[in-house]
Amino acid sequence: ASDVYKRQAALRGGRVLGPASLALMGERGHLLDGTPTEYGLGYRIDDPPPHLVLHHTGSSIGFNHCSRRIPAIGLVTVI
């Protein structure tokens, strides 16, 4: 989990992407007919009040993880 947290910290700290690219990760994608999806660039997007929540999951043999970011308050959790 520490490597996933380090990735999240690097994203948050601007060491991986610029502000415009980072903002795109939190924007919903759209289907060809214009219907919005629940997926941004690498994140599942949930926007219940009062904060936008970005989720990312992954797995491999013997490994699973779930990370969540709440950009407005700088919170990151990794399980």
Image (spheres, rainbow, N blue to C red):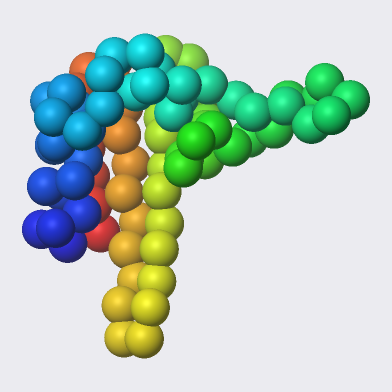
Say which residue appears at 38% left-offset and 21% top-offset. Answer: 21
x then y, percent, for residue 17: 26, 27
Q: Quadrant of residue 52?
A: top left
Residue extending farthest to the bottom is: 61
Above-or-below relation of 65 to 20: below
x then y, percent, for residue 32: 84, 29
Say which residue appears at 63% left-offset and 35% top-offset. Answer: 38
Above-or-below relation of 12 to 57: above
The quadrant of the picture occupied by the C terminus is bottom left
The quadrant of the picture occupied by the N terminus is bottom left
Above-or-below relation of 62 to 56: below
Of the pair 41 and 46, the residue shown nearer to us: 41
Q: Quadrant of residue 55?
A: top left
Of the pair 47 and 63, the residue shown nearer to us: 63
Above-or-below relation of 64 to 68: below
Query: Quick check: can you spot residue 57?
Result: yes
Say which residue appears at 34% left-offset and 71% top-offset. Answer: 64
Q: Is residue 73 left or right of residue 38?
A: left
x then y, percent, for residue 28: 60, 25
Say which residue appears at 35% left-offset and 56% top-offset. Answer: 66
